[in-house]
Amino acid sequence: MTEFPHLSDIVVSTPSKIVLLVIDGLGGMPHPETGRSELETARIPNLDALAKKSVCGLLDPVLPGITPGSGPGHLALFGYDPVEDLVGRGVLETLGIDIELRAGDLAARGNFCTVDPQGLITDRRAGRIPTQESAHLCKALNAIKLPGVEVFVHPVQDYRFALVLRGPGLNEAVSETDPQRVGEPPLPARPLVSEAASTAGLINSFIASARKLLSGREYANMVTLRGFSQLQDLPSMGQLYKLKPAAIAYYPMYRGLARTVGMTVLPTGPSLKDAAATLADHVNDFDFFYVHYKAADSAGEDGDFARKVRALEEADAAIPDLLALKPDVFAVTGDHSTPAVMVGHSWHPVPVALYTQGRPGDWVEAFSERACSQGSLGRMPSRHLMLLLLANAMKLIKFGA
Amino acid sequence: MTEFPHLSDIVVSTPSKIVLLVIDGLGGMPHPETGRSELETARIPNLDALAKKSVCGLLDPVLPGITPGSGPGHLALFGYDPVEDLVGRGVLETLGIDIELRAGDLAARGNFCTVDPQGLITDRRAGRIPTQESAHLCKALNAIKLPGVEVFVHPVQDYRFALVLRGPGLNEAVSETDPQRVGEPPLPARPLVSEAASTAGLINSFIASARKLLSGREYANMVTLRGFSQLQDLPSMGQLYKLKPAAIAYYPMYRGLARTVGMTVLPTGPSLKDAAATLADHVNDFDFFYVHYKAADSAGEDGDFARKVRALEEADAAIPDLLALKPDVFAVTGDHSTPAVMVGHSWHPVPVALYTQGRPGDWVEAFSERACSQGSLGRMPSRHLMLLLLANAMKLIKFGA
């Protein structure tokens, strides 16, 4: 939930519009040869100009030192508790392939694997079978019937699939079945709390049926399941902030995350220019827009410094289109840092620039990690940003007499 | 309560003296024509010199984005939790007219109003009747007797009055009676928790008696009540910090707030020169002085940039008098920002300068929002300040071995 317990007493609905641009994996680190980070290397005149007229700072998604996944990173930006309101792995895997989840559904991440005649695992990933083969196997598993619940099995990628059980009384507190080692049998699912006993029973029935159905198959003859999780029953952004929020995100996982907090998810394309066009089409229909841009993170994850620089320059080129719609408040930040030199997500704080129409900025001369560290926002938890967006959009009245 | 659970183990009483000057509504924003804030516009050589020899920073009274009233803003400066330890509206209204409240008293804010023969409200403010008429009506209402509790009715201003009930078992969890609309009858007070049932009954009896007593009166023939609240049973600053604290504040609300945390409230005049004289008279009697200066907030609330500048210059002129008494620790900050361009309180962080006799400051060249943002204190919750005051006054010993 939100960090400020009296929020509902002070938040008001107004026509003002907020645009939050999330450049995935925005923060970086200096290149060892030049001493300049991706942001400091990129030619980003529009973001630099924005920073000059914004208030700037650095955001910690979870806590200093904690490297967040995209789930906690985004939830914090939306003002939720990135630890308490954690979204489980099964749920994220399922949302990540754009599958609808309902309250109470139990989601799990599945692996196709191979076992020998004694039932001992010989390959935990079934030779990384191609997705199209997985899809055939998933079709077979979809025929499994369990008492009192519906069963949905969806291919994800290669040997990975998502299992969703739908029905009353499901409980996510069930142990994982992957022993994480070859030469051992898959583990039975065990209830971790007494209320999860019937769920564990259903899962063990599913696995037994799967083993029977897959017996003698060429590619994989067994499954393991982990990351049992249910959608958190999070209050929507509409309830919390009296907003009408929309998500402009191309990739499924971010669309799924936006749905968990009650955003309307708009169709759009992969580039930030596409996103700006979508924003222009819908600018009058909502008062909060979450715009997601993926390419910077992907390049950082690949350790490709130059490609991350180009991705930031591509984002920069779309800034004028986003600003042309004159949102009352426009903020640019990231869900976490993905420095190319770290070849993955990192714990480093993320630059943020918060621009409010007609208000002066502070003295920051560029949009970068170093420059933003000197801004008036200082260093703060990402979770605070949502309160600042609402305040700057004049959607919060005074607290206390 | 305080944020550090082991405070009582490490706080020691010493002769050292702390002066905390609260310039109400201190923080501002740049004037659109000059780009300079009120502090940056004012000629404040004494505050600038103080900042140079102080450690400086920016304080968030509640949370970034939250605009505080004076209650939460001050409680945070005194080291209390500005959310948890919130002081209710009825209590503040009562304290604001310098009426004593005791633990367990129930305070409410009242409106005189008019109702038609059917009992429907025709004017929620009874034509904004003058205070002297209200005073007559309050005198009449003071005759109301309720079983088991004493009844006090005090005029506040115009149509507003304060009701205080004193007796055992009162509970503030009672709904308001003002329907906030004309053409509707006043609402009955309802208990919001079962423990408040008898309190709601007393309030409804009060209102029924008031209606009878006011029936046929020229100016107002009914009352509504809201903001039912009780003094939080806060530990005193004496208990928490082993201090002997005094308040030098002219306006009733701040005197009331100081009383809620156990300060001795000294008589003084409205100017900061008056306050300095009061401090000089009592400097040997206490070891913590809260000095309140109101004029900057009033000018900001009126949107009068030039008058706020003058108020800051007036405050500046009194700084040498305050420093002449050589307090061991002298801090200047505000309870919240009141930028003239916002014509009211705002969520922006408040500059702070903390000067300790004989200790070096950091590198800040002026006392302003921008300059202080570069100080070594960084940006922190206002609540932390009290710990820093105690530490710099050498009143905190080492925590842990």
Image (cartoon, coloured by chain):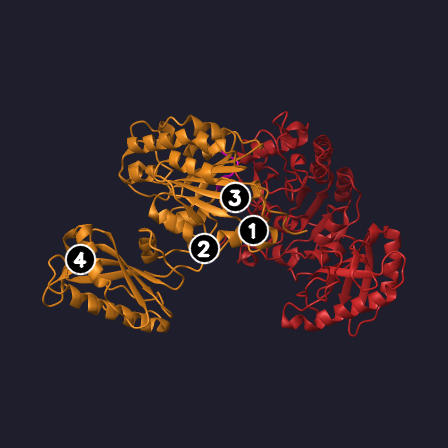
Chain colours: A orange, B red
> Do the dots labelled 2 and 4 sit on one chain?
no
Left or right of B308 in this view: A7: left
Q: Nearer the viewer, residue A38 or B292?
A: A38
**Cβ–Cβ under 8 Å for marks 1 and 4:** no
Under circle 1, the secondary element is: loop
Few, some or many C-alpha atoms within 10 Å of disc 2 (few <14, some 14-19, many ≥20)? few
- Looking at the picture, how far across and down is residue A230, in whole percent? 37, 61
What residue did someone put label 3 on?
A: A287
Can residue A397 be seen here? The reply is yes
Query: What chain does badge 2 belong to?
Result: B
Q: Nearer the viewer, residue A96 or B21?
A: A96
Q: Residue at x 30, y 42 (%)?
A: A344
Question: Residue B396 — which label?
Answer: 1
Res. B163 image quadrant: bottom right
Q: Earlier in the sequence, mark 3 or mark 4?
A: 4
Few, some or many C-alpha atoms within 10 Å of disc 1 (few <14, some 14-19, many ≥20)? many
Q: Which residues are magenta?
A: A375-379
Q: Amino acid at mark 2?
A: Ala
Q: Earlier in the sequence, mark 1 or mark 2?
A: 1
What residue did someone put label 2 on?
A: B401
- Looking at the picture, how far across and down is residue A292, in whole percent? 39, 41
